[in-house]
Image (cartoon, helix red, strand yellow):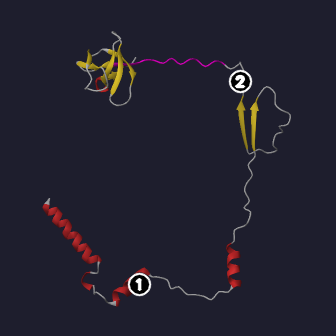
């Protein structure tokens, strides 16, 4: 490893020497400045005498038109109601037509009610402590064995879940590391 570091520093030193001019470098000479100027090729700037008339013509040539033509977009809103007002007349050539359906009528079928299924999980540890609160500092309420089914009441997302044992209906807290989702 030491050889690699020394080799790297040696290479960086050699690269620095070559990039800064190497053996041909002469400090304070104009030859280096001329070489740099040739490499960069800075354009020369000339100053011209301009009058007010010349300036006005340049500004007029660069002027932006006062009013930029914008395309017109016709939008027609339509509603499917029982009666349409007579005042609304269709546009001659609409670009976009937006339609709405009247859902206020009693003819619409009722949406089926959604059933909320319980979050059932299975204990994966041999004997896992169920506690009074979310942490090991709380007292043990019960011990659950591998394969017991529990219903998760709340999961705050901090590694502990509040649960109810399906068989005994005891409520407590357990680490979610010892639980697996039951697939029905």
Q: Residues within 10 Å of mark 1 (few under 14, many from 20)?
A: few
Residue 176 part of the magenta-drawn span: no
Image coords of residue 120 (percent x, y):
38, 18
Number of numbered discs: 2
- Position of 156 with respect to 97 (left or right) is left
Per the picture, the main secondary structure of the magenta-coloured stretch is loop
Residue at horizontal 33 percent and vertical 22 percent from the top: 180
Question: Which quadrant is the N terminus positioned in?
Answer: bottom left
* Badge 1 or badge 2: first in the primary sequence: 1
Q: Is residue 75 above or below residue 153?
A: below
Residue at horizontal 68 percent and vertical 86 percent from the top: 51
Determine which quarter of the picture holds residue 38. bottom left
Q: Disc 1 to disc 2, how far (Cα)?
A: 80 Å
Residue at horizontal 76 percent and vertical 41 percent from the top: 76
Q: Which mark is residue 170?
A: none
Residue 119 part of the magenta-drawn span: yes
Pick out the residue farthest to the right. Answer: 86
- Position of 40 with respect to 69 (left or right) is left
Image coords of residue 80 (percent x, y):
75, 29
Q: Is residue 113 above or below residue 135?
A: above
Give the residue number, with chain letter if any, for mark 1.
37
Give the residue number, with chain letter if any, for mark 2.
104
Pick out the residue farthest to the top. Answer: 168
Q: Would residue 97 be seen by someone viewing this image from the given angle?
A: yes
Pick out the residue farthest to the left. Answer: 2
Residue at horizontal 28 percent and vertical 27 percent from the top: 135
Image coords of residue 20 (percent x, y):
29, 78
Q: Which region shows up in magenta? A: 109-121
């Amino acid at each position: 490893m030491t050889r690699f570091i020394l080799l790297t520093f040696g290479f960086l030193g050699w690269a620095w020497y070559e990039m800064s001019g190497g053996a041909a470098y002469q400090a304070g000479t104009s030859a280096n400045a001329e070489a740099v100027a040739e490499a960069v090729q800075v354009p020369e700037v000339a100053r011209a005498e301009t009058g007010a008339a010349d300036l006005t013509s340049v500004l007029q040539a660069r002027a932006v038109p006062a009013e930029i033509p914008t395309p017109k977009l016709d939008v027609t809103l339509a509603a499917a109601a029982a009666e349409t007002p007579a005042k609304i007349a269709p546009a001659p050539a609409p670009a976009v037509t937006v339609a709405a359906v009247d859902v206020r009528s009693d003819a619409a079928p009722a949406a089926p009610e959604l059933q909320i299924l319980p979050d059932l999980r299975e204990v994966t540890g041999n004997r896992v402590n169920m506690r009074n609160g979310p942490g090991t500092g709380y007292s043990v309420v019960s011990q659950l064995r591998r394969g017991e089914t529990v219903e998760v009441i709340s999961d705050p997302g901090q590694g502990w879940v509040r649960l109810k044992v399906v068989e005994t209906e005891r409520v407590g807290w357990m680490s979610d590391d010892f639980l697996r989702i039951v697939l029905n």
